[in-house]
Image (cartoon, helix red, strand yellow):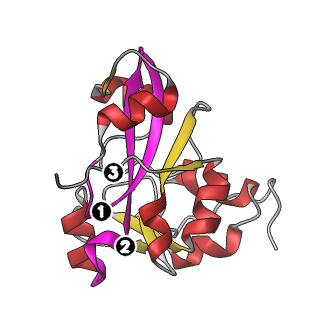
Amino acid sequence: MSDSTTPPPTTTAAHPRFAEALLQLGLGDLIARVRRFPEQTRTAQEAAAAIGCELSQICKSLIFAADGVPVLVLMDGASRVDLDLVRRELGAEKVTRARADVVREATGYAIGGVPPFGHATRTRVLADRSLLHHEVVWAAAGTPYAVFPMAPETLVAHAGGTLVDVRETAE
């Protein structure tokens, strides 16, 4: 088992900062399970097609601004976030999608490659319960080209997430 002083392997498909975060969390064995694709998997649809899994098995890491403060919402790839439900959950006046520069500043990663944990700053994390409908979900590994598999309960725990119901429902 690796410790936090062991540098990440140079051959990993994960972003080096994310590989380091995995080591610090004691998840070094996961580094070898990161899959890299020749084409970008910036969207949930692209990722599901590349992996060969259901769209709902993709874990989207989405950054929103709640009264100007970044918050991470983890959502299954087949669903959309209901901003009003997020606003109520957080007790915020206004929730909007965060701008690209805010996403990069808060997480250290570009949109399309934001992992569910291992960010540059600590943010509040909401995880939609829909993720728990699968034994394994796939999430970005710090780049638009790389993903990793993890049990959703474990992923939410490492992200420090609170389980909530914030997905849009058909009315």
User: Regarding mark 2 in the picture, which secondary structure is present there?
Assistant: helix
Residue found farthest to the bottom: 52
Give the alpha-carbon distance from disc 1 to disc 3, as whole Å: 11 Å
Q: Position of residue 167 (x, y in %)?
A: 33, 51
Residue at the disc numbered 3? 167
Q: Name the residue type under label 2.
A: Gln
Q: From the image, which quarter does the N terminus lie in?
A: bottom right
Q: Are marks 1 and 2 in contact (CB under 8 Å)?
A: yes
Q: Residue at x 71, y 60 (%)?
A: 23
* Direction from residue 2 to residue 51 in the image, left or right: left
Q: Position of residue 40 (x, y in %)?
A: 22, 61
User: Where is 128 relative to 77, above or below?
Assistant: above
Residue at the disc numbered 1? 77
1 or 3: tag closer to the N-terminus: 1
Magenta-span inclusion, residue 53: yes
Residues in magenta, as a range: 51-80
> In this orientation, does residue 66 appear?
yes
Q: Residues within 10 Å of mark 2 (few under 14, many from 20)?
A: many
Q: Position of residue 118 (x, y in %)?
A: 59, 47
Q: Residue at x 83, y 61 (%)?
A: 3
Quadrant of res 150: bottom right
Q: Are marks 1 and 3 in contact (CB under 8 Å)?
A: no
Q: Name the residue type under label 3.
A: Arg
